[in-house]
Image (cartoon, rainbow, N blue to C red):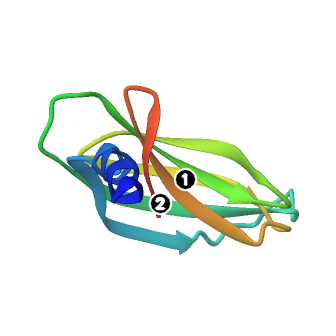
Amino acid sequence: MRLFLVLLPLFLFSLSAAYVDKIYISLRQCLCLEPQWLYLDVKAHISSTGDSPLNLTLQWFDGGWGGACLLGPGPDVYNICSVPRSSSAVALTLYQNGLEIDRV
């Protein structure tokens, strides 16, 4: 019972009224002078029921989460992001009032 009372507020705190509901990421074809970078077209849609400012960024994993390509505020965002070719993963991170609330 005590464990339930401790975990319930943490669970409720983690719920958000904003989330990323559509994502489109494609590799952009280019004649790149910098072959160690990949260029990605990133489009996303953010669903939100609140009026708080939302920002979406693309981050990459290269031994640790780094970089931040700002996609912009919602609801529809688009940007061309450069990512190191050595990256093993990318993630879209949604921030609300400066706090991370969702990562895809």
Residue to which mark 1 is pinned: 80
Q: Position of residue 23 (x, y in %)?
A: 37, 67
**Residue type, numbered disc 1:** Ile
Along the line of sight, the residue nearer the viewer: 95 or 45: 95
Query: CA gap, disc 1 to disc 2?
Result: 6 Å
Picture quarter containing residue 45?
bottom left
Q: Position of residue 99 (x, y in %)?
A: 45, 33
Instruction: Report helix, strand or loop for mark 1.
Output: strand
Along the line of sight, the residue nearer the viewer: 20 or 33: 20
Residue to which mark 2 is pinned: 42
Q: Position of residue 42 (x, y in %)?
A: 47, 60
Q: Residues within 10 Å of mark 2 (few under 14, many from 20)?
A: many
Instruction: Report helix, strand or loop for mark 2.
Output: strand
Which circle's residue, 1 or 2, is located before the other in the chain? Answer: 2
Quadrant of the image containing the N terminus:
bottom left
Q: Are marks 1 and 2 in contact (CB under 8 Å)?
A: yes
- The residue located at (52%, 73%) in the rendering is 26
Along the line of sight, the residue nearer the viewer: 29 or 21: 21
Residue 64 marker: none
Q: Is residue 51 above or below residue 29?
A: above
Q: Residues within 10 Å of mark 1 (few under 14, many from 20)?
A: some
Q: Is residue 56 above or below residue 51?
A: below
**Residue type, numbered disc 2:** Val
For residue 24, side relative to residue 29 (left or right): left
